[in-house]
Structure formats: C-alpha cells, structure tokens
Amino acid sequence: MAEIQTEVSVDHRFARLRTLLAQVSDLRSAASVLSWDQETYMPPGAVEARANHISTVRQLAHERFTSDEIGTLLDDLEPIAREMDPLSTEASLVRVIKRDFDKAVKLPLSLVAAISEAVSHGKDAWKYARQANRFGDFAPHLARLIDLNRQKAEAYGYEDRVYDALLDEYEPGIKTEQVEIIFRDLRRDLVPLVEAIADREEADDTVLHQKFERQKQWDFGLAVIRDFGYDMQRGRQDFSTHPFTTTFSITDVRITTRISDDFLNPGLFGTLHEAGHALYEQGVDIELERTLLADGTSLGMHESQSRLWENQVGRSRPFWEHYYSRLQRIFPDQLGDVPLDAFYRAINKVHPGPIRVEADELTYNLHIMLRFELENALLEGRLAVADLPEMWNAKMDDYLGITPLNDAQGVLQDIHWSLGAFGYFPTYALGNLMSSQLFDQAAEELPGLEGRIAEGDFEDLLEWLRTKIHRHGRKKDADDLLKDVTGRTLHAGSWLSHVRKKYGDLYDL
Amino acid sequence: MAEIQTEVSVDHRFARLRTLLAQVSDLRSAASVLSWDQETYMPPGAVEARANHISTVRQLAHERFTSDEIGTLLDDLEPIAREMDPLSTEASLVRVIKRDFDKAVKLPLSLVAAISEAVSHGKDAWKYARQANRFGDFAPHLARLIDLNRQKAEAYGYEDRVYDALLDEYEPGIKTEQVEIIFRDLRRDLVPLVEAIADREEADDTVLHQKFERQKQWDFGLAVIRDFGYDMQRGRQDFSTHPFTTTFSITDVRITTRISDDFLNPGLFGTLHEAGHALYEQGVDIELERTLLADGTSLGMHESQSRLWENQVGRSRPFWEHYYSRLQRIFPDQLGDVPLDAFYRAINKVHPGPIRVEADELTYNLHIMLRFELENALLEGRLAVADLPEMWNAKMDDYLGITPLNDAQGVLQDIHWSLGAFGYFPTYALGNLMSSQLFDQAAEELPGLEGRIAEGDFEDLLEWLRTKIHRHGRKKDADDLLKDVTGRTLHAGSWLSHVRKKYGDLYDL
C-alpha cells in the first residue's frame, strides 16, 4: 500500500514539474514573440515600451523558474530519475533542468543586476566607440564586463579555467582545454592552407556583385529551403536587419533574412543558414513541447545544423548542379553567360579580410580562434584591456596575414563583448567542425547522398539528421551526441579534410 | 516628524502601486501581441501552442492583478485619493483600479473556470450549429452560458436588474433602464423612418460591387487615415480575417483590415472605422502609460470614436467632396463616369437585411436593440432558449420588416453569446449615439468644421477629440465625460437628428 502511494506521488510530482516548466516555457515563448515582433514589424516609436514588456516577461519567467517549488521537485525527483532510462523524457527533464536550475540560482541577483546595467551602458558605448573608431571610449566598459564575467564564473564555479564556467553556458560539457587542443590542430593545418591559396590567383566573384531583384532572391531562397524540408505550416520567413531564427513552439519556428540588392550572398546563404537552424528546432520530438528541452542541445550543435545546410550542402558543387540552371533562368541577364564552374568558384572565393561576418568558409574559423585566445587571456589577466587592440592586430597578421585599417574594423567589430557574452565565440567554430563530422557520417550511412543532393532531393539527409540529432532536443549533450552518432567526440579532422579536398580542387593545390 | 513620514510613505505606496500595475500592464500587452500575431502572421500549425502561451500570460496577469499587495495598497490609498484632485493620475488610478480590482476578486475561480470551459465548448458548438443551420445543437450550450452569466451577475452583485451587472463590464456606470429608455426613443422614430425609406426607390450601389485592385484600396485607405492623423510611427496596418484595433502601448496602436476585391465598402470603411479606434488609443496622455488607465473609458465611447470617423466623417458629403476625385483617379474604369452624388447615395444605401455586420448606418441600431431585448428576456427568465429563434424572427419583422431565411442568418449569426459575452451588444448602439452627440458638439465649437473636412483637413477635429476625450483615457466614466463635453448625458436626439437630416435629403422625405 505504501509503495503504491509513493508511485502515485512520483507520477504526481513529475506531472507537477511539467506543469510548472510549461508555464516557464510559455513565458519564454512570449518574450521571444515580443522580440521577433520588435525586429520585424514593430513601429519605431514603441522601443521603450517593448523593452518594458520583454523585461517584465523575462523577469517573471526567471522568478517562476527559480521558484522553491521547482527546486524541491527537482531535488526529490533526482534520485528517482537516476534509476530511469536516461533518454526518457522524465529522466532527461530532471537531469538537464536541474543543471539549468542550479546555475540559475547560483547567480546572486545583485550580480545579475550589475551585469544588466553594465551591458546596457556597454552596448551604447560600443556602438559609439565603433562609429567614432575610438577603442578608448569602450575600454573601461569592456574592463568592467570582463570583471563581471570573472565574478559570474566564480559564482558558477569551475575546476581548472575561469573560461570553463562561461563556455558551459553555451556549450555544456565541453572544457576550455579541449577547445584549445582542437583549435591547435586546426590552426596548424589551416594557416598554411590559407597562405598557399593566397599565392594562387584570386577567384573572381564579380558575378555575385550585380543587381539582383529582391523579390526574386526571396522566392528562390524560399523555394530551396522548402526543398530542404522547412515546414511552412510551422514556420515563416520575414525580413529583418540581422537574420535570426526564433522558436515559439515546435509548431512555430520562424526565420528572418536580409537581402542585398547588389550582392547575392547575404540573402541566399543567409536563408540557407537560418533554415538549417530552423530544421533543427522543427525536428525536435513533439513530446518535448513545453518542457524546456525543446531546443538545440548547444550553440555549437545548433551552428552545426546551420552550417551543414549552408556550406556542406549549399556551397557544394552537387547542390549547384541541380539549382544553378534554375537560378540562371531567374537571373538570365546576370548569370545567363556565367558557367557553373565560374559561379561555383565565385561563391567559394577565399579572401582573408578583417571582418568576421564577411569571412569565407575557410578563414572564418581563424577569426574565431583569435577571439577565443584573446577572451581567455583577458579573463585570466594575461592581457590588459589597453593592450587588446595591439594584440588583436598582431594575431590578425599571424593567422590571416592582414592588418585591420582601424579598430572599428578590428577589435570593435563585434557586438558580443558589449553584451557581456564571453565564451560564446568558440561555438561558431565548433559548429563548423561538427557540421563536417556529421555530414561525413551521413555520407557514410547514406550511400549516394551527393547524387541525391545533385537531384535536389534532401529527404534522406533530413530524415537522418532528425533521427540522429534533432528529435533529441536537449536530452543528450552535444559531445555525447556526436560520439553516439559519429563514434568520435569533437575533432577538427573531418572539417580539415573537407576544406583540403574542396579548396585543393578549387585552387589546384 | 510623524506627518513627514506618512507623506513619504504615501508617495512610496503610490509608487509601489504603479510598479505593480506596470507589470500587469506589460503582461496584458504581451498577451495582446500574442493575439495580434495569431490573427496576422502566425503559421497555421501553431494554434494549440499559442493558446497555451496566451492562457499562461493572461492567468499570470490575473494572478498579479488580484494579489493581496495590490488589494492592500488600494484599500490604504483610497481615503487619501478621495481627498486629491479626482482627475489627478493618482486619484484616478486608485478610484478606477479599485473598481476593477473589486470586480476581479468577486468572481470565484471555480466560476471563471466553468465559464472558460463553457465558452470553449460553446464556441465550437456555435460554429458547427451555424454551419449546419441547427439551432438545437447550440441551444444547450447557450442555456448553460446564460446560467453562468446569471451566476456572474450574482457574484458581481446588482441593485435592480441582472443585466446591470453584466453591462457594467463593458459600459461602466450606465444602467439597463437608461438603455431601455434611450432605445425606446430611438425605436419610436427609427422604425417609421426605415419604413418610409422602404417606400422610396432603393439606392443603386452596383458601382461599389466591381473589381477593385486590393493594393490600391489598401493604399487609398492608408492615405486617408494618415490624413486623419493616425501616427504610423506609433502604429501599423496589417491584414486579418476580422478587422480589429489592438494596443500594446500608447506608442504602439495597430489596426488590421480586410479587403474584398469585388466590394469597396469592407476595406474602405473598415479601415476608417479601425483608425477611429486607434486615434483614441494613440491620443491617451502618455502619463497614463503602464497604469491600466491607458485605454478607452468604455466600449461605447470607443465605438463612438470609430463611428465618428467612419460615419460622421467618412460617409459624409463634405468628406467625399475632397476625396472622391482622388478615388476616381485611382479607379478610373470603375468610377470615372460615376458622379459624386451617385457615389454618395451608393455608400449610404439603406437596405434592411438580416445580417448585423452588413447593416447600413441607419438600420444597424435596430439589430442591436433586438439583441439587447432578447438578452434581457433570456437572463430574466422571461424567454426560454427554445423560444429564442421564433422571438428573434418576430422582432426582425417588427423592426426591419424582414424574416431571416434560416437560423444561420438569424439567431446564429453572431459569435458573441458563444463567447459568453452578454451585455456587450448595446455598446455598439450607444457608441453610434455618442458619436453624433460628440460630433454635433465639435461642430458647434469648431465653426467651419464641414468646410475643413471638405478640404481634407482634420487637424482641429482630432485636436478637439484629443483634448476633450482621448487624453483622459479611463480617468472619466463615459457618461460623465459626455456630460462634461456636451452638457448632456447620453441621449438619442443628436443621432436621430443626424439621420433624419441625412436620409431625409437622400430619400427626399
């Protein structure tokens, strides 16, 4: 009799936990809708009011999430969940959400408030410093944000490196030292490859810099991502200044894009990139709806999905064997006389430049490594903020062989640090590496994959990604997931082979 | 010393009240954004998820609003507020919000839940009953909803009539008996007027039933409401199936419209109507932002603003003296040969029909009276649900001289009752009456008003409405406001004079 009561009570507690988490999930979704609207349709006069709406909803979501009731339920259920199938929704819920909860309650509210204020000032200071090209104006804010991030890391706790605690927010489970080892491998092979390409004749991409009618670009991009399998019954695309993907529910995953009317890349590859993110979120098991597990398992894994569709698929030759003639028919004046090979070379042009977001597939990771190294040096006190611009430029020269014209296109180019986000950057590069590791595995398990891509048929690939990655949501950590799917934890080898082969062919190395 | 402490403490309590109400206001705004998105851009697959988002946010707004802390603050501040200038924000806040609060806490949660469930079923049942033209399928749901509304009225309490308690939700301060008296006056003059017009030759409105390109309709409507003074920096227009106005903040008041490509009226007059609602909300004193007073003071007063711009302005001859040539240039094939007088007759065609939302300016109020009388009879037990269709049709014959073909276009046409909304309908007619009463007063205080409308100049009129009505938000009750502005409480006289004059001229009576 006593045992049956316990059973009932456990079920009841799981149900109660899900109810409470569902409310938190709804509030977070509401905040996301408010942000999406702000970036897409909101009239300009509403900025201040909307900041209040979002802040109130987020604060309430935080309050509800860190409630004593959720804490007690997680504590009570943890030993029970540990006895269950770890991939069951219940066990995953307790395991993953307990980790979130413990982190959330570790930050003192005073520190959260201090960070929020420093970010609010830092963001403005960064904006003006970049406009005026005056790093000195941003430096004190940066110093403050570094200090607050150190405090945050202390509050979270870490074993070896201060950076571990920060990285864990974006890429749970991975350690700074692992990233360093991976990046060392990467750098060793990548820098000489970029140098070798620099000695060759530069690819000509002038065909991409012509007038392309916006609506036609929009329609083509949309047609491609529908072919990928992006479900418009559970998604939509809108315009925004900065492209992003946002999820309100598994049944409502939206992307935005921006289109340049005199350069084909931002609209086209931006759309494929965001669709990759969206396919991940649309593919999560519906059973995880409103559990807080219906999300990508890490930023790196999320980026792996966007990069897989953008680069492994969208910048591949088989892909364009299918789509190029269609694109030529849409833009006959611009592309009618341009052969496929020339177009393919153009979209894969390697050109070391100072700006990360404009970087090509090959040099992008070097931008990331540089930031990762500088972040670590700053946080560990090995580098003073005042010396940052000089170190930035020295590393740019080392890795990419270029010197930024000024700090605005150097150390001041990214918004991330002004938002207090340290530990975020490496996930971009980790995502690139994961995308290759996963794509290679898919190619191995799906014979003829390239051929099907060359026919515009992505069904098997998407189904493979759904089964292996997407449906799990946050149930498995990124590195475990990689190991389960590919047999190896994260490494640089797949991606290096991919670029050696691809750019070796393109540049006749 | 003690006195100074009390002073500080009162200030502090007012500030605290405003902080708490601001949070409630933010949550309500968030729910409104969620609903707006649902009606405009949300992908179809997200219906269930969005219902959860909205329900959670609304529930939280309700919890926060009915908190003990707000209750105590209101109790403490009430005697203090009573000594203050009643139009001060503080005094108004306590007075108006205390009334809201007392109502909100009077409803037992069990009753709220029962209503919510009955509505959820009732709405579906109504939809299918209307489609199948089977009143019997909806009847038990309607009976239940009437019973629950009676319980609601008992919970709120009332002195004379059960309907008073329900009406008070939408039109605070006005009593059922007042409405009966006003409607009696209205009916006495209106029914013979409609009969007299029925004896005349019917106006020809075939010119309105042609193909009109949607984008051009959209652009024209938008141009007109910009001329009215609708501020696009603090608003926007989107498409939706059912037009509505929604307010997220005084700096973000949005309208939606629907456009028919073979009938000019829905898009054009729908846009002017919603713009009237929006001008009201955009005109509220910014000092009332996030106080819960930044809203129309009653549904009737709100409707008065939409009807004023739609009918008093937008269906007037002076208005079209300015705009008709422009509309002709936009639609030369459709309207190039149609003289202004013919167009003016067409848009003011009187045609008694069974459907409320398609009714003309003149017969619309008769549809409302019928519903008001039936609602009262049902709630007071003088009419059984089973006898409702027969009574509906009898009254349609009495007031409009027509008999609906079936219940789908009779008693089943409106969604309101299935949503549990009893006491809502009369506000439509009260709004019509108020619009005339206010417009007459404006015309008296603004000599040459018609002439300025004939020049497309609405500045004085909007400024007058802002000063007299809009800026006050909910500070003054509708009937007090009417009396302050026009010297008289609500009456039917202005509107009756307006239609006697207008339709007397049009139909040569």
Image (cartoon, coloured by chain):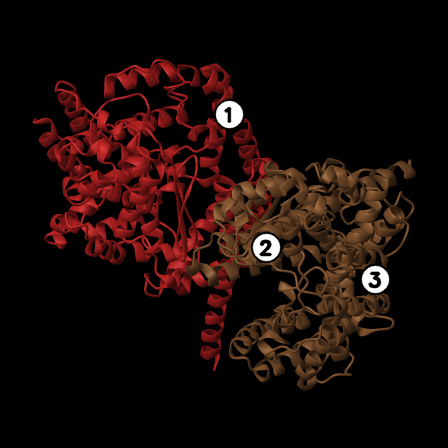
Chain colours: A red, B brown
Q: Amino acid at mark 1?
A: Arg
Which of these two is toward me, A261 or B369? Answer: B369
Provide the secondary structure element on which disc 3 rests: loop
Task: Give the residue pinned by disc 1.
Answer: A144
The chain carrying label 1 is A
- In this picture, residue B280 sits left or right of residue A324: right
Same chain for the residues under marks 3 and 1 in the image: no
Q: Amino acid at mark 3?
A: Ile
Provide the secondary structure element on which disc 2 rests: helix
**Residue A378, image x and y in percent?**
40, 24
Q: Are marks 3 and 1 in contact (CB under 8 Å)?
A: no
Q: Is B114 drawn above or below residue B30 in the view shown?
A: below
Which of these two is toward me, B95 or B272? Answer: B272
Q: Are marks 2 and 1 in contact (CB under 8 Å)?
A: no
Cα separation, mark 2 vs mark 1, equals 60 Å
Residue drawn at 57 percent across, 75 percent down: B126
Question: Is residue A242 among the parts visible in the rendering?
Answer: yes
The chain carrying label 2 is B
Indicate the quadrant containing the C terminus of chain A: top left, top right, bottom left or bottom right. Answer: top left
State which mark lies toward you, 3 or 2: 2
Residue B266's mark?
none
Same chain for the residues under marks 3 and 2 in the image: yes
Which of these two is toward me, A377 or A199? Answer: A199
Cα separation, mark 3 vs mark 1, equals 59 Å
Cα separation, mark 3 vs mark 2, equals 33 Å
Provide the secondary structure element on which disc 1 rests: helix
Q: Amino acid at mark 2?
A: Asn
Which of the marked residues, 3 or 2, is nearer the chain's N terminus?
Answer: 3
The chain carrying label 3 is B
**Residue A310, image x and y in percent?**
26, 41
Residue B265's mark?
2
Task: Give the residue pinned by disc 3.
Answer: B174
